[in-house]
Image (cartoon, helix red, strand yellow):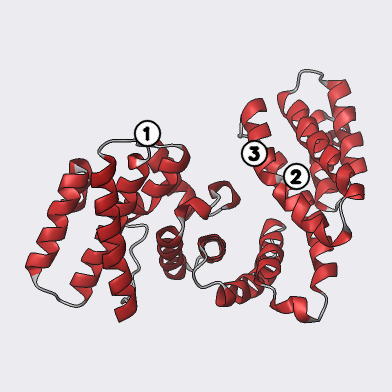
Amino acid sequence: MDTEKSVEGLMQKAYLSLKTSDAEGAQLALNEALKLDFEHPEVAYALKCLSWWLERLNKLKDVPGLDCGGYILSQWKHFYRFLDRIGPWEYDSCLYAVRHFVFSQALGFFEDVLGDGENQHDPGLLLQVGRCYKGVGNFEESIKYLEQAARFRREDGETLSELADLNALLEETRAAKALFREAFFIDPQGIEIRNLESELILRLADRVREAGYSGQEFLEWMPVYGALYGVFSVKRELKLAEIGKLKQSIFTLENEIRGRNGEAGINLLIPRLINRYLWLIDHYENTRADPALIEETMLKIKLADPAVYEQYRN
């Protein structure tokens, strides 16, 4: 059989079509492949994914022009839930092609909005444009927009995590580790792991899942395990005001945990508190503080979670 007319050849043709934003050509190629093998799992999977997105993109006619790019990106969380239902997540070539297609569509709308005027200083828009460029594999353009967004949003976990992820993809590992550590300290709940692509963070995420954590708990434990496994190993000196805020945050969390006494929500507070203890220990070590302060904080970790204490000691 002619390679281009085989199932595999038609799938490759479909994926190439998606990367050039030719959704109609991709759908035709996949339908041809399905005729050759009605039970081929990847063909069926790809058709389901493409149909899902085409249905959403068809709704753009009812979305105001300025909001079209944002609408497209807002659908990713829904798409992830769709993928969880149809499973598995093993068809990387398919998902990469779909991702490239979708981000290309969104990017076109964002570039129209961005223009060359005041929107060039909109951090939310800069973040979305940077995400889109990353999604289509143009890392050189992506880094420009994400760095601009981060200059406006120095304390935004989502922005810093996207910039960290891109640095990891560019093999700027030191910068990536520092930025990931910062992002997960600021706002772990604001980070969407499935938007991240680098092996650095995905391997860590796998280890946290293997430890039995999921949902909101999973996100709170990410920085703790990042410290334990040396992923978040690049640290910076804290400013005087930051030290005060860190200690106040620890005091508040300790009181909240005591007040709840095992009630709902405490499972989120414990890893959040341990993460702050780890930052405080780093500060003590960086400033060569009295070793008794480090030991006192270590004992607090032991009380919060003995297993984490043992891992950190070792």
Frontmost of labels 3 and 2 is 3
Q: In the picture shown, does residue 133 fall above or below 260?
A: below
Quick check: can you spot residue 226? yes
Frontmost of labels 1 and 2 is 1
Name the mark on residue 92.
Answer: none
Query: Could you tell me residue 283's position as x and y percent?
Result: 24, 71
The answer to which quarter of the image holds residue 209 is: top left
Mark 1 and mark 3 residues within 8 Å of each other at the beta carbon: no
* Cα distance between the residues tagged 1 and 2: 30 Å
Quick check: can you spot residue 87? no
Compared across the picture, whether 153 is left or right of 57 comes to left
Amino acid type for the residue under numbered disc 1? Gly
**Label 2 packing within 10 angstroms: few (<14), some (14-19), many (20+):** many
* Cα distance between the residues tagged 1 and 3: 20 Å
The residue that mark 2 highlights is 98
Give SS at disc 2. Answer: helix
The residue that mark 3 highlights is 80
The residue that mark 1 highlights is 212
